[in-house]
Amino acid sequence: MGAPVLLAIDQGTTGTTCLLVGVDGVVQRRAYRQVPVSYPRPGWVEQDAEALWASVLGASDELLADGAKPAALGITNQRETLVVFHRDTLRAVAPAIVWQCRRSADLCTAHREAGDEPEVRRRTGLLLDPYFSATKLEWLLRERPELRLRAEAGELCAATVDAWLVARLTGGRTLATDASNASRTLLYDLHTRNWSEELCRLFSVPGAMLPEVVASAGRIGVTDPDAFGGRRIAIAGLAGDQQSALFGQACLRPGMSKNTYGTGSFVLANIGAAAVDPGHGLLTTVAWRLGDADTFALEGSIFVTGAGLQWLRDGLGLLGSAAEAGPLFDSVPDSHGCIFVPALSGLGAPYWDPDARGALLGLTAGVARAHLVRAVVEAMAFRTRDVVEAMEATGGIAFSELRVDGGASVMDGLCQFQADLLGIPVARAASTETTAVGAAWLAAVGEGLAAGPEEVAAGWRPGRRFEPATPGRRPAESYAAWGEAVERVRSRSRRR
């Protein structure tokens, strides 16, 4: 028999990627299905939950059409996105409310004004923001009282995408989420390591709707052949996409960090076994649970990265494809004074301003298409520096290197600009599919195909390393101008 191969399902915001991955982390094959995103009202972001499931089936069927037999399956997913579905039929009863959606902003404000945030922060490591799942569910059950009645009768389940996929894959036999995903809901207590009855009451969530919380690696369930194309595969790895990327980047020691440039960007730093209160607009989250031990991460969440390029492509028609961004960025030496503040869904860490709106500043007749594209790409690096500086201000993190992955990380110009802006090396993994590789490695550990995380982490391969240029005036000046632009945007949001 040959070496075992693992199936990784990476269900992201704009599409689903399925990979066949060796235990060594080498990607053997890839399949992809796009998933539409809808914006029915300003600030609202939805997806057809059944389309998410169909994308998983389509990509996995293509990948396994030659009869490949994976030894285990790992799942990673867009976090915070809420799916409410029928316990027996497994059909979604409402559109999936996507993590970017801001419809519950007023509920967050009401909770904050009621003085709820300090206790929520203490228990969850998070902040009151519509980004997280609990107020999305609170909003849905308030707006659709028939769903609340059905939930209280035990008919409905509420879950992040991972738990819904596990339920669909197992034909409803398993309803489970891992600790990394649970910790993104505002309903999970980092200290008791389970759902909080007090938080469920606070957000008016029937606790019976929630899935079981399990470890990130271990036998979670087995796919039902009738549900999954005749295949019976052990589901042995489960993690939110950013935590999975941290694992896939082999950031196993405290102090190691990564940034994923996806639809949004998420800087995570491994902080070990202690769930600290970070302050500075940062979050504490479960990175993964192995056995009975939790590893925690400090996180800075940036809502718009690749979504900015998508806006240039689909909203303004300035790009035919996202792949054009890199050459356009490289074609000009700077943005000609143009600054893009990517608050298309509010501003995340370290500002947490849901009322902020995006802005293009510094426009003159000399600004061309390439300058606008460069401004959008530079904003990815500026927002990353915002978060890194906040993390260093906590006193517990000193960045010596930033590992990067995600679609936008293929741009050499972005990686070099990021290194120059931070003044530290930026290391790009040999594979940009580190999120899915992390899920595969968790499955390998969970199914006993690897002795432990250190064994699979030995498979991490560095790609190109970008060293910061000699410090000069331009990065400092451009970052100072960026700070002024953000303050103008936030000042306007405060006047609303």
Image (cartoon, rainbow, N blue to C red):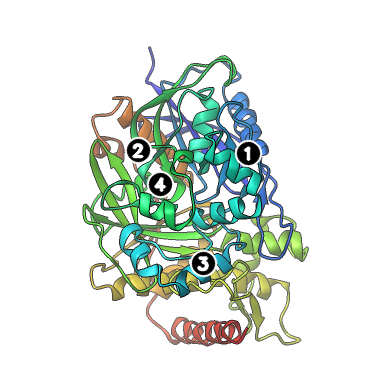
Q: CA distance from mark 1 to mark 3?
A: 27 Å
- Residue 299 in percent (x, y) is at 38, 61
Give the residue at x 71% y 53%.
38
| Of pointers 2 and 4, the one earlier in the residue sequence | 4
Q: CA distance from mark 2 to mark 4?
A: 11 Å
Q: CA distance from mark 3 to mark 4?
A: 19 Å
- Residue 369 in percent (x, y) is at 73, 72
Q: Which residue is mark 4?
A: 182
| Of pointers 3 and 4, the one earlier in the residue sequence | 3
Describe the element under mark 1 as helix, strand or loop: helix
Can residue 299 be seen by looking at this rendering?
Answer: yes
Q: CA distance from mark 4 to mark 1?
A: 20 Å
Residue 393: which numbered mark, if any?
none
Label 3 neighbourhood size at 10 Å, few (<14), some (14-19), many (20+)? many
Q: Which residue is mark 1?
A: 52
- Which amino acid is tagged 1? Leu
Q: Which residue is mark 2?
A: 216
Splitting the image into 4 quarters, where does residue 202 fall?
bottom left
